[in-house]
Amino acid sequence: MNKDLTYKVNDVVVYGTEGVCRVSDITTKPFRDREVTYYVLKPVFNKSATVFVPVDNEKLTARMHRALSSDEIRAMIQSLPEQGAMWIEDEAERKVRYKEILASGDRIQLIQLIKALYFHQESQRAIGKKLHISDDHFFKEAQRLLYDEFSTALDIPRDDVLNYIDQIIAEATGSAPPGPDE
């Protein structure tokens, strides 16, 4: 087994659209005419799933990212007011780009995607409309990926993540967090 592995057993990683996973094992199994070493990932929020990632497959291992620490999350949240939104007018182009962002797991781009879709949702709501079904899917999926990682790193329930974000932004900007009716 390769001693120069990037991850070790019990590391918490984010893997593509699977989200937060724990490296439960590193194992070698026969595959065709050779032995292949795999990271065995157990998604934190889907206990019945198991993901095998070949250690020597750069395309797949590139989808694995070390999970953020609580300090990194706090710094990221404090930067939220400065983050731009990522709205793309052309629907087909938007779908392609948003799929790429979800697959990449880039947290800043996920935040920009969430902000863009949140503001678009609010503008649609103001005229009595809803988000397009694909936009709603991207919005929920981006929130799931980001909130699951925040929940795991901060050791708080997923349902408390938005309140935590509001609290940190309020501290950073010196304003009171929004109330439940705002």
Image (cartoon, rainbow, N blue to C red):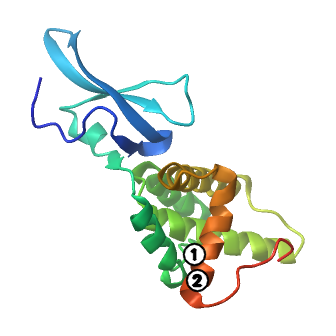
On the rendered image, what quadrant is the C terminus found in? bottom right
- Callout 2 crowding tier (Cα within 10 Å): few <14, some 14–19, many ≥20: few
Q: Residue at x 57, y 36 (%)?
A: 45
- Cβ–Cβ below 8 Å for labels 1 and 2? yes
* Image coordinates for residue 132, horizontal then vertical, percent: 74, 58
Q: Residue at x 73, y 53 (%)?
A: 133
Mark number, residue 171: 2
Seen from the viewer's position, the closer of residues 67 and 100 is 67
| Label 1 SS | helix
* Image coordinates for residue 87, horizontal then vertical, percent: 57, 73
Q: In this view, does 111 lie above or below 84?
A: above
Relative horizontal placement of residue 90, taking residue 101 as reference (left or right)? right
Q: Residue at x 34, y 34 (%)?
A: 10
* Image coordinates for residue 155, horizontal then vertical, percent: 54, 51
| Label 2 SS | helix
**Residue at the outermost right position:** 128
Seen from the viewer's position, the closer of residues 59 and 158 is 158
Q: In this view, does 23 lie above or below 174?
A: above
Mark number, residue 168: 1
- Callout 1 crowding tier (Cα within 10 Å): few <14, some 14–19, many ≥20: some
Instruction: Identify the amino acid type marked 1.
Output: Ile
Seen from the viewer's position, the closer of residues 162 and 107 is 162
| Residue 46 placement: quadrant | top right
On the rendered image, what quadrant is the N terminus found in? top left
Spatial CA span between label 1 and label 2: 5 Å
Instruction: Identify the amino acid type marked 2.
Output: Glu
Label total for image: 2
Q: In this view, does 127 lie above or below 174?
A: above
| Residue 161 placement: quadrant | bottom right
* Image coordinates for residue 66, horizontal then vertical, percent: 33, 50
Seen from the viewer's position, the closer of residues 82 and 176 is 176
